[in-house]
Structure formats: C-alpha cells, structure tokens
Amino acid sequence: MTPLPLPALLVALAGAFLTLDRVAFLQSLAARPLPTATLVGLILGEVQLGLMCGVTLELVWLSRQPVGGSVPPDETLAALAAVVAATGTPVEWSGYARCAAGALIGLPYGLLGRRLEIMARKANAVLVERARAGLKELDFAAPGKAQASGALNFFLVGLVGSLIAAFTANHLSAYLTSLAPVKLERAFAAMAVVMPVVGAGAIVASMGGRRPVVLFLAGAAGALVAAKSGLACALGGFRSGGPQG
Amino acid sequence: MEADAAKRLKVLWRSLWVQASWSFKSMQTVGFVYMLDPLVEGNDEERRDKLLSHMEFFNTHPFLAPAAVASAAVAEAESHSPSPEASEARRFMMGAMGGMGDSFFWGGLKFLAAAIGVALAVEGWSYAPLVMVGLFLAANLWTRWWALNKGLHYGKMALLEIQKLKPVYLSSRIKLAVAALVGWVVVRHAATGATALGLGETESMAFAAVVALVTMLAVRKGTDPLLIIYAAMVAAIFISVA
C-alpha cells in the first residue's frame, strides 16, 4: 500500500513534532518507537500493524541512551520509517513478516536521523552568543528567541527526515520485498520474533552483573509456567488478542 | 525564597524547553537563563548583569534542572549584583543532579515505562503506548514541579532532599524489576509468534530464552545488538531459502 500524499504529509508532520519530544521539548517518551509507530499506524489506517512494529522496535532501541553529549541513532525516525515501509510490503504477507521487513528497512533511517540531529545541535551553537548579545542590549526576550530558534532547528530536521522516510520507505520496501516475496516472508516473520528478543538481551546485558540475568530467566520461567497453566490466557490476549496484525 | 504560583508555573513551562537550544558547546546554557529570568529581581541593569553571569556552560538532567535554577535564584535574591554564590550553586547542582537524574530517569524509569508498554501491547492492549507515555509524563512533570519548589525552599541544600529519595538505589531496584518483566515479555511474545518461527509454543519460548542469553553474552563482549539483528536476518534468509 502506497501512502497518499496527504497521509504521508501528516506522517511527516507528526514525525517533526515527535522529534521535538526527543530533546527540545518535554521528553515524555512519546517519541519512543512504541508510541511513534502506533501513531503512524493510526494515521495510515493500520493501527495494529503500527502497534506490532512498535513492539518489535521498542526493545531493540531501549538500551541506547541519549546521555550527555552522545547522540544515538534516531529511534523516532526509525520507527516512523518502519511503519511506512511495512505498509509497502505485500498485503498478503502476515503481520509479523510485514512488520519485521519494515523494521529492518527502518533501521538505516535511524542513522539518517542521527546525522540530521547532529546538524541541528551544531546549528544551535550560535544561539548562546545571540542570547548574550541581546541581554547586553537589555533585550530580555533574547534568550526566549534563542530557545525558539533552537526548537525550530530540531523541528525542521525532524520534518526533513520524516518527509524523506514518509515518501521513500514504502517504495524501498515494495522493491526489496518484490525480489523474493514467498521465501523472504518466512525469514521476515521469524525476525519479528527474534528482534525484540535480541533487544531484550541487550537491555539485560547493559545492566551488568548476574542478578538481572537471573531475574530475566525468572521472568521467562514465570511466563512459561503461566502459559502452561492457562493463566496467560486469563490475563489477556495471549493467543487471540495480541498485536499480530 | 518567595515566588507566587504564576511565577512558578512560568518557570515550570520554561523548564519543558530547557534543551530547546541544546548545542554541543553550551548544551543547556540558554535554557538555564531562560528559566531563571522570571525568578530574578531588581532593575533592568541588575537583572541583565545577573542573567549574563549565568551565561556559562550548564548541563544537567532536564527534569531536575528547575532545582538548579531555583537554587541560583535564591542566592541571587540576596544581593543587588551577580552573586558568586549563585554561580557556585548552579555548578554544584548541575553535576550532582545530572548523575542522579540520568541514573534514575534514563537508566531506570524509562526502561520500566517502556517494558510495561511493551508488555501491555503484547497482551493486545491498543492503549499500551498511552499508558507508557502517561506513566513517564506524570513522573516527569511531578519531578520538575517538586524540584522547583524544593530549590526555592532550600536553595542548594535541595540536593539533600533529592538524595533522600535515593534515586540511584531506586534505579538499581527498578532495573531488576525491568529484567524480570522483559524476561516475561519476550517469552510471551515468542509464544504468540510461535507460528512465525515455525515452532511449537514451548519450543518457541525456549528458543527466545536461548537467543536472549546468547545476545547477553555477545553484547557483554562488545558486540553491537544491531549487528546481531542483521546477522540473524541473514541466517533466517539462508534457512528459509535453503
């Protein structure tokens, strides 16, 4: 499915606003892959696919920390591109396969987003001098104007990245998945399960020490026991209501 | 220091933008001055001199930044000219709160909110992203407001109030809870996706646990998780084609 210009523009605009949440404003986690992918899925009329892509990507990106001056790959743009790419995969594919194909195609967009974000941070370097010069002239609005300019820089790079993703990711996925659709579907479907598992392993590894590993195994064993005892079905959509798409 | 509700709300609102002009060189410097402005008293020249004296490098955890701003404002309120104690308060709070905030929010609470969100999504809750954002946003806003009020009340001694909450210890406990929750989530996710793997439910769950353990070992040896994902993709293509 190719996004029409209007939904694609809405996706790009949503991506730009979500980019603000990453650094410049609020930092509410709205720009994390799960909320971003679900919102993009909602805009494109495939909310379950978006939710599933969010699950696939959230754990993958979680161990990457934006602390201090480090700039990790842009998980917001990666998630946005993943859902757009997933909509470009063959509709007869399972939700798992579409989602994993989208997620894998979306990962390089995260690197593009990182480059763009670094550009915004470099462009902001002049703002401190502008604010200082304004204050010297008793212009007390100068720091506010500098803040607005900085936020605009983040917004614009978010918009550029999101526009690129919104208008290219689906075509890229349509082309790549057309190469060997039948055989690739199985591989992609398996990856939809493997990717969050790898992400989870990376999260626990980042915690250090043995206790997180022991607790991880305890949680895994608990889920296994719950599944075998039927408790899991009682808790929710384990088999029927999960985000299979 | 006395500050009415309107001023406090103004600082709170400005604190949401503390990183708006973030740059590699000055980081949150402009954001700090922008937040400080409503709390600085005096005539225009005094206000200018005080604000200019804070145009120095500043970077801390954004949610705790209001405490640093309030501490500096408390010190500034005691004189008509820029106070060296205010600059000292800013530097003192910046380092300590940066470490505590990063550890608690980025190293703990973010993981917990995301793990809860993913756990609910795997169970089929379409509103899972809202729960995830809502949990974190509530903590985010409450912390900013609380830190601002503690800073205005205690000055730089607000740091002791923050330390009383034991953020670093809490973060380590939260991480352990996240490890268990993530273990639960991946196994549930693998069970749901057993057909995608072409395995039975039990085999799929065991497979997920083994893959996670192998990943842990590889990541601790320095392997990038994204490299593992692409390697797994190549293996999956090879197996499906063969």
Image (tube, coloured by chain):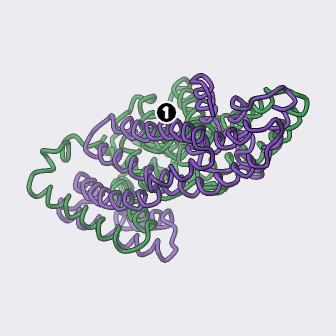
Q: Is residue A27 left or right of residue A212?
A: right
Name the residue located 45 percent from the left edge and 47 percent from the top edge: A102
Residue, disc 1: A2
Amino acid at circle 1:
Thr
* Any part of residue B242 in sight: yes
Q: Is residue B131 left or right of residue A112?
A: left
Q: Indicate the quadrant containing the N terminus of chain B: top left, top right, bottom left or bottom right.
A: top right
**In this structure image, what is the colour of chain B?**
purple
Q: Quadrant of residue B213?
A: bottom left
Q: Pick whichever, B110 or A49, lies toward us.
A: B110
**In this structure image, what is the colour of chain A?**
green
Q: Residue furthest left?
A: A229
Could you say where residue A188 lies in the image, as x and y percent from the top left?
Answer: 38, 55
Name the residue located 85 percent from the left edge and 38 percent from the top edge: A132
Could you say where residue A176 lies in the image, as x and y percent from the top left?
Answer: 50, 50
Could you tell me which chain the residue with mark 1 belongs to?
Answer: A
Q: Bin the neighbour count of mark 1 within 10 Å (Cα to Cα): few under 14, some 14-19, many 20 and up.
A: some
Name the residue located 34 percent from the left edge and 39 percent from the top edge: B128
Q: Pick whichever, A1 or B158, lies toward us.
A: B158
Q: Residue furthest right?
A: A137
Q: Quadrant of residue B149?
A: top right
Q: Quadrant of residue A21?
A: top right
Name the residue located 80 percent from the left edge and 39 percent from the top edge: A127
Could you say where residue B6 lies in the image, as x and y percent from the top left?
Answer: 60, 22
* Any part of residue A171 in sight: no
Q: Indicate the quadrant containing the C terminus of chain B: top left, top right, bottom left or bottom right.
A: bottom left
| SS class, disc 1 | loop
